[in-house]
Amino acid sequence: MENFTAYNPTKLHFGKNVIDKLGETINEYGKRVLLIYGKGSIQKNGIYDKVIQQLNLVQAEVTEYYGIKSNPLVDDVSRAAQLGKLNHIDVIVAVGGGSVIDSAKITALSIANNTDPWAFMTYKVKPIKTVPVIAVLTLAATGTEMNGAAVLQNHKTGEKRGFVSTLMYPQHSFLDPEFTFSVPKNYTAYGIADLIAHSLEAYFGEGDATLSDRFVEAIIKEAMEVAPLVLEKPTNYDYRSRIMWAATTALNGLTSHGRKYGDWGVHDIGHNLSFLYDTAHGATLSIAYPAWLKLHKDRIPERIAKLGNQLFGTNTVDETITHLEKFFKSIECPIKLSEINIGKEKKNEIINQMIQTQINGLVYKLTDEDRTKIVELML
Amino acid sequence: MENFTAYNPTKLHFGKNVIDKLGETINEYGKRVLLIYGKGSIQKNGIYDKVIQQLNLVQAEVTEYYGIKSNPLVDDVSRAAQLGKLNHIDVIVAVGGGSVIDSAKITALSIANNTDPWAFMTYKVKPIKTVPVIAVLTLAATGTEMNGAAVLQNHKTGEKRGFVSTLMYPQHSFLDPEFTFSVPKNYTAYGIADLIAHSLEAYFGEGDATLSDRFVEAIIKEAMEVAPLVLEKPTNYDYRSRIMWAATTALNGLTSHGRKYGDWGVHDIGHNLSFLYDTAHGATLSIAYPAWLKLHKDRIPERIAKLGNQLFGTNTVDETITHLEKFFKSIECPIKLSEINIGKEKKNEIINQMIQTQINGLVYKLTDEDRTKIVELML
């Protein structure tokens, strides 16, 4: 087992009507609030009204920034940070899924350190402080509600990048499974693909961490058991709550204790696909994971087979991959680029992008030949 | 799933030589340190010297309180608190197992709130602040290094009681598996029984929490797999680290999310046995759990069988209990009172104690008839 630090300062409130405590929680940090959200779905499903009611309860002075894209852009973060600085905000309230909360985290750093957000993402400037972030989660997927990570893309530099800092844990996160009732079927499934991919990135990490492996298996089994149920009954509280909690635990540190780091090669591939075609993050992962496993099947057969044994009761690498593909298909996640209308004519464009950004894992290093092979396996 | 809050403020440093950061960590809180430890084993195995070296590094002014018993007494806590107040200490450093760290937690409350420690244990006075506690763990067992719980006994009132407060999370905990290399075989096994019992108390808790159930199973499987290995090779770093981390996760909140509370009836039985005969905590649990399961086998057969299926691949309640007993026997933990020289002549004494203190679970309520039956099943 590798040395590690177990520390997670986020206070996460989970369950029915936890939003009722939002107002008093915000009040601990101040009155001037920057409210960040996406493209307006929270106004349709009533969540916006509930948040505003809580803000009014404590007479908060609210500045709004909305329009965060599902693949969030650094330009939005820059503008949100300018607005926040102008209004001397005390706290950011982020209402949405991963893209909104990630944007809020970097906005908070940008305001507190008075620095261009992309300077953090490229690890050129190290943040030394932050503005507190309170998250209200509306999508079970990325785990950002209980970790110090964020992902943004930048059209000027042609990149989608991740950044990690202990300053970026939300102070509080509010998770009411009912807030995810209106998430459409495809995005519910993408969220499930995402949480499974997070668990797998840890599983294929560096270091022998047996208990963390068991937690990975537990989370993936839970997700695979609930997936068909929640897709059939999207307003079932129990199913939504199980998926929501599984998504949090898949990336809140639990699966990483005792490892140096996860691999994250598949996420690197996925980010590049999202950058090129604005593909939903989860959909890129259900396509990229089977391809990555196929590339590695003769390199780490025992590790893959152990996973297959735990998840599917099989002992062969090929069957493990087939089972995973079958699962993704069963929840209508794509496993080939052709299923999302990216045809063979894009092959060179994708290969060039993968080579240009030198997609890689932290553990399993990829050559340009591997990058080409992976693209071929995804087509 | 029940509503819950996931929050654990302890910063836990795990691995080889993590003690090297102890000095600078203490320094964040101040110079005046109350050092609490047990009956001197840390002086024999060199851990005391390592701690003192760290304290000297930062020129700490150290007051020592030692002699904490393995079933810790409130009298020791009162004396430690007096000493701490007298010396205006800034921070407590607890070096030991559960008894030492639990004592330090209540000492910290007693100092900060200037209150008799038993007043907290009986929930008569609610603490409003604390002195920071830093734990250096030397025994994998109770999980106190990453939770807000403590257990003390009081010979005047004739009780062993537990207390829980969010103020009682250690600020930092240092876990070097090498610090447990010299733990004798029997106490290593009792620690394993303890962590399994903690997992089971959660499993038999209130509320349908499927992912937490899976985590329970993961932790118990991990413990059962490593148990024979660590007992055979007590200085194997990997085995010691696996047991140490399993013990922490068994009671740091992970297995409780989505439940109202655990049952804790078996711990109540165990505390009474420890009170009467100064029996090691883990040994009381390996005796009490099979008896508790036998009492409940016709009341909650499905729940017990589900556990048996996951842990032992059996579907019958009786076989589940037999397998658990076999496991405890295999690591030389007692499963009957007679094995620890408590004979049938003590039957009435024990029954009287159990009835007098009204031992009970939070979920599965016990009658006096149940209390009598459980004692008979343990004899």
Image (spheres, coloured by chain):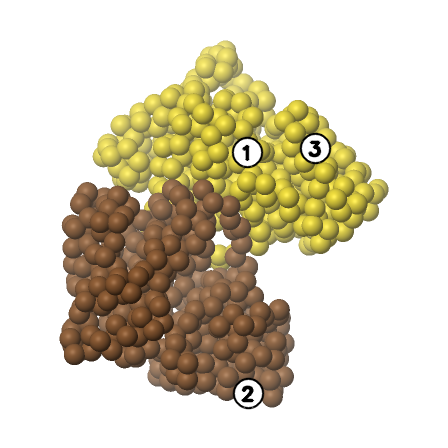
Chain colours: A yellow, B brown
Please tell me how crowded label 3 is: few (under 14), some (14-19), or many (20+) other residues with Cα within 10 Å.
Answer: few
Which residue occupies 46% across, 14% down? A338
> Could you tell me which residue is drawn at 48 percent across and 26 percent down?
A234
Q: Residue furthest right?
A: A86
What type is the residue that disc 2 sits on?
Leu
Specify whether residue B188 is in view.
Answer: no
**Mark 1 highlights which residue?**
A178
Q: Is residue A121 above or below residue B325?
A: above
For disc 3, the marked residue is: A49
Query: Callout 3: residue from which chain?
Result: A
> Is B322 left, or right, of B197 in this rendering?
left
| Residue highlighted by disc 2 | B83
Which mark identifies residue B114? none
Q: Is residue A14 left or right of residue A257?
A: right
Label 1 crowd (10 A; few <14 / some 14-19 / many >=20): many
Helix, strand or loop for disc 1: helix
Tell me the CA gap for discs 1 and 3: 15 Å
- Percent across and percent down for residue B215 are 37, 48
A232 or A274, nearer to the observer: A232
Q: Is residue B283 above or below residue A251?
A: below
Which dot, 3 or 2, sits closer to the camera?
Answer: 3
Residue type marked 1? Glu
- B64 horizontally vs A318: left or right: right
- Estimate the spatial distance between the alpha carbons at disc 1 and disc 2, rounded to whole Å: 52 Å
